[in-house]
């Protein structure tokens, strides 16, 4: 285009020369008040033409220059991309061959030539972490985040670096920053929740778990997350209870029970908070209601402990008589009645009960331990040894009063969360019975367990509010 313009300008210059010969008139052009300049008409025409032609030439010349610079940059960028891709492929080839030092060397060269190559920085940092150079991994992943702070892969990689280096507070601060910016990636939230639960940051874990549970549609996954939410709510209540803030504790426990009315740890926690506030009648009614809803004797055992603390053994005896009146064939309740008789010094009555019950159910270690101890005190050595031997022949042989129905670990005290498998609401009172392979004791099924639609309705109310009905 520029050559054509030059040719046109030459032709026009020849024409103008001829016109100058044919037109010799002049025009007066005053520059200053007392100075007049005589300029040929053709000169003005040439000046005007030259100015216009110069502008056209400048515009097109600049356009060509811009195109040339653009093409040069694109060519250079294409070559850079090809070089980066070649190095990237070489690095992965070395990784696939398990030549990690060579791969690290190639990636180091790659990120030196291309400092903003996030994929290379991410992989480079991961390899540094796998080699044990955690400081370098942290430095590289933090450098990569400069180019994109919201990249979830980089957040998770850096969190992993911090956790491996034992810098848990830094890991939680990183995930907390993401959460405060309304970050909603489930993988990040799950990792944040895990760290908070592991470090018993229950109040913060509750806010994270609430968002996480709401992120799932109806289904098994949401119910699992809501179950975790109930457990964390219970832990928040337990934290307040330990701090002496019984009112806040009660609210937290009630919140857990609103979602899942069968969550025994929250029921027991609520009753204990009520009793500490002097609202003993409410606490007693609450525990009895919990037993009626679930059939778990944990509620009755807590009532038993309360009555014994108050020095009222008659109330304990009446408690189990009342329960057996509702469910006379329940083996677990009969065992507790015998246990209480022994605890209150009614040894002969207790032994008589135990002997008549022996063939009625699949008894576990606690039953035979209690029987053996009574025989031992009565100096019936052979019977005592026989009872203790029976414990060793059981599977599992545990004779402690509490067991996790999930991992089948035995404990001497109850807790709302299994210390072994970390599941909530899984530690039960064995009631002297043997745990069957499914993880629950025979004849130990809940007596009045609510139907599934009730629990699902509670979940629905939690997410959507009470139904119109």
Image (tube, helix red, strand yellow):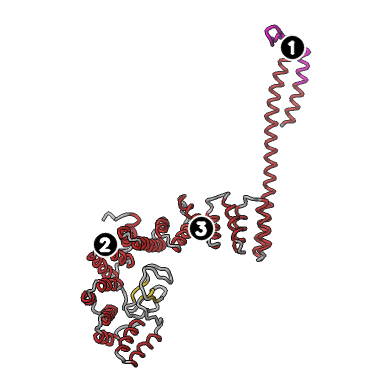
Along the line of sight, which residue is nearer the eye, 214 or 125? 125
Mark 3 to mark 1 CA distance (whole Å): 84 Å
N-terminal of the pair, mark 3 or mark 1, is: 1
Q: Which residue is mark 1?
A: 40
- Residue 458, visible in the rendered structure: no
Mark 3 to mark 2 CA distance (whole Å): 40 Å
Is residue 307 shown left or right of residue 432?
Answer: left
Residue drawn at 34 percent across, 92 percent down: 381
Q: Nearer the viewer, mark 3 or mark 2?
A: 2
N-terminal of the pair, mark 2 or mark 1, is: 1
Q: Nearer the viewer, mark 2 or mark 1?
A: 2
Q: Crowdedness of circle 2 by 10 Å Cα count: few (<14), some, many (20+)?
A: few
Kindly give the residue lying farthest to the top in the view shown.
34
Q: Which residue is mark 2?
A: 277
Q: Secondary structure at mark 2?
A: loop
Whether 44 is drawn above or below 181: the answer is above
Q: Which residue is mark 3?
A: 171
Magenta residue span: 13-36
Snapshot quadrant of residue 390: bottom left
* Label of residue 401 in the image: none
Q: Would you say residue 381 sits in the magenta stretch?
A: no
Mark 2 to mark 1 CA distance (whole Å): 113 Å
């Amino acid at each position: 285009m520029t050559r054509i313009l030059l040719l046109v300008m030459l032709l026009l210059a020849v024409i103008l020369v001829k016109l100058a010969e044919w037109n010799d008139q002049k025009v007066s052009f005053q520059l200053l008040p007392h100075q007049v300049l005589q300029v040929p008409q053709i000169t003005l025409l040439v000046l005007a033409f030259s100015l216009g032609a110069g502008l056209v030439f400048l515009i097109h010349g600049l356009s060509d220059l811009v195109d040339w610079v653009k093409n040069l940059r694109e060519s250079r960028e294409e070559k850079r991309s090809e070089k980066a891709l070649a190095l990237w492929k070489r690095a992965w080839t070395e990784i696939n061959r398990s030549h990690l030092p060579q791969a690290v060397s190639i990636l180091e060269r790659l990120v030196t030539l291309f400092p903003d190559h996030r994929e290379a920085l991410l992989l480079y940092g991961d390899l540094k972490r796998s080699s044990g150079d955690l400081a370098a991994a942290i430095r590289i992943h933090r450098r990569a985040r400069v180019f994109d702070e919201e990249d979830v892969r980089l957040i998770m990689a850096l969190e992993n670096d911090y956790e491996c280096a034992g810098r848990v507070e830094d890991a939680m601060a990183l995930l907390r920053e993401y959460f405060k910016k309304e970050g909603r990636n489930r993988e990040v939230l799950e990792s944040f929740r895990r760290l908070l639960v592991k470090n018993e940051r229950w109040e913060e874990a509750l806010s994270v778990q609430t968002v996480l549970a709401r992120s799932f549609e109806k289904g098994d996954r949401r119910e699992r997350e809501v179950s975790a939410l109930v457990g964390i709510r219970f832990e928040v209540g337990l934290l307040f209870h330990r701090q002496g803030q019984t009112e806040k504790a009660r609210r937290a426990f009630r919140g857990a029970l609103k979602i899942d009315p069968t969550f025994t740890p929250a029921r027991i926690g609520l009753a204990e908070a009520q009793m500490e506030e002097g609202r003993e009648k409410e606490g007693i009614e609450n525990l009895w209601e919990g037993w009626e809803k679930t059939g778990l004797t944990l509620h009755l055992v807590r009532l038993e402990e309360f009555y014994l603390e108050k020095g009222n053994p008659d109330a304990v005896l009446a408690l189990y008589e009342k329960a057996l009146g509702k469910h006379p064939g329940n083996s677990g309740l009969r065992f507790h009645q015998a246990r209480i008789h022994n605890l209150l010094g009614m040894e002969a009555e207790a032994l008589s009960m135990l002997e008549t019950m022996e063939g009625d159910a699949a008894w576990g270690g606690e039953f035979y331990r209690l029987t053996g101890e009574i025989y031992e005190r009565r100096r019936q050595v052979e019977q005592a040894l026989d009872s203790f031997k029976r414990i060793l022949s059981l599977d599992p042989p545990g004779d402690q009063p509490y067991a996790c129905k999930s991992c089948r670990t035995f404990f001497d005290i109850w807790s709302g969360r299994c210390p072994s498998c970390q599941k909530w609401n899984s530690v039960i009172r064995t009631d002297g019975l043997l745990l069957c392979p499914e993880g629950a004791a025979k004849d130990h099924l809940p007596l009045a367990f609510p139907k599934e639609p009730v629990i699902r309705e509670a979940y629905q109310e939690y997410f959507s509010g009470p139904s119109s009905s």
